[in-house]
Image (spheres, rainbow, N blue to C red):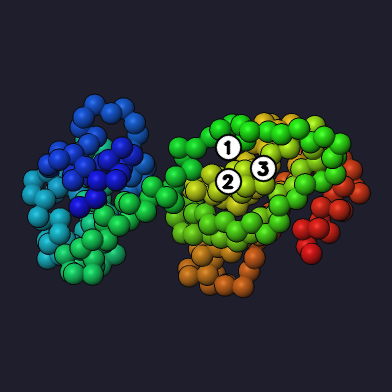
Amino acid sequence: MSTINCRRFPTISAANGSTPARLNGSSETPFALKMFRSFASGLRRPLTSIVAQFNASPSRASNRLSYSPSPPPRRTEDLSPPVNLALVDSEELIREILIRVGEDPNREGLRQTPARIVRSWEEIYGGYEQHAEEILVTQFCAGKYDEMVLLRDVEFYSTCEHHMLPFYGKAHIAYLPNNKIVGLSKLARLLEMHARRLQVQERLTQDVATDLQRILRPKGVAVMVEGKHQCMCCRGVHKKEGMMVTSCLLGAFKENLATRSEFLALAKN
Ligand SMILES: [Zn+2]
């Protein structure tokens, strides 16, 4: 039984009974709902039928024999009115996904899987609850130091927003101080915050750079990210060796060739 995710990812157990936590007046948009809508939109079975099934008899959702993987497409006029999926328990949504990929969610190895997945969301998507201003709040006087500060080879793990599959790699984050500096771990935490959201690598790179520029106001910022994307390895073109490299240069790094070259040379070493 999981109780850890009652705030963001309502579960039956979190609500002390069969009533999902969402029913208790929260106005938050459940993250599980967004994820499931995205997943369900590509499937052929009408979403409303799942909810009807849950409401009618929760045990039916876990009975594989009751599920037809390829129902005939329904005509538009047959569709039921939209159902509030916020009322559906997060773990039930995962169980439904397991059924759709061809599994029996009641077999021993899978029984705890929905709870594990929902728990893991707290970590994997924890970046939505963090703010760059809080991470970079502590700044120190740089004194006379005005050379480049570079944090190199910082590993990250993120999730591609197109396929919800992992992409991971390392980032190099540099800035040219303008009287202020921050602890190096804060640069890593800024990267972590943006990585722990659904992302594309281009935006991850830009978000880290623009937050650092906006909050610390240095003379310039450079961020380079090298990532491997599972959506390119295990599906699609099946190329596991490809590495994606993205960069974002701001201020002095964009305007000054020597500064840019120094960053690129240090990042490659
Ligand atoms: Zn992808």
Horizontal arrangement in the rendering, residue 124 relative to residue 60 (left or right): right
Q: Nearer the viewer, residue 201 or 183?
A: 183
Residue 261 horizontal side relative to residue 172, left or right: right
| Residue pointed to by mark 2 | 189
Q: Are marks 2 and 1 in contact (CB under 8 Å)?
A: yes
| Whole-percent x, y for residue 24 in the image | 21, 29
Name the N-terminal-most of marks 2 and 3. Answer: 3
| Residue matched to label 3 | 183
Q: Which mark is residue 22?
A: none
Type of the residue with mark 1: Ile
Q: Nearer the viewer, residue 227 or 78?
A: 227
Q: Amino acid at mark 3?
A: Gly
Q: Residue furthest right?
A: 258
Q: Is residue 227 left or right of residue 14?
A: right
Which residue appears at 14% of the width and 47% of the height? 54
Q: Nearer the viewer, mark 3 or mark 1?
A: 3
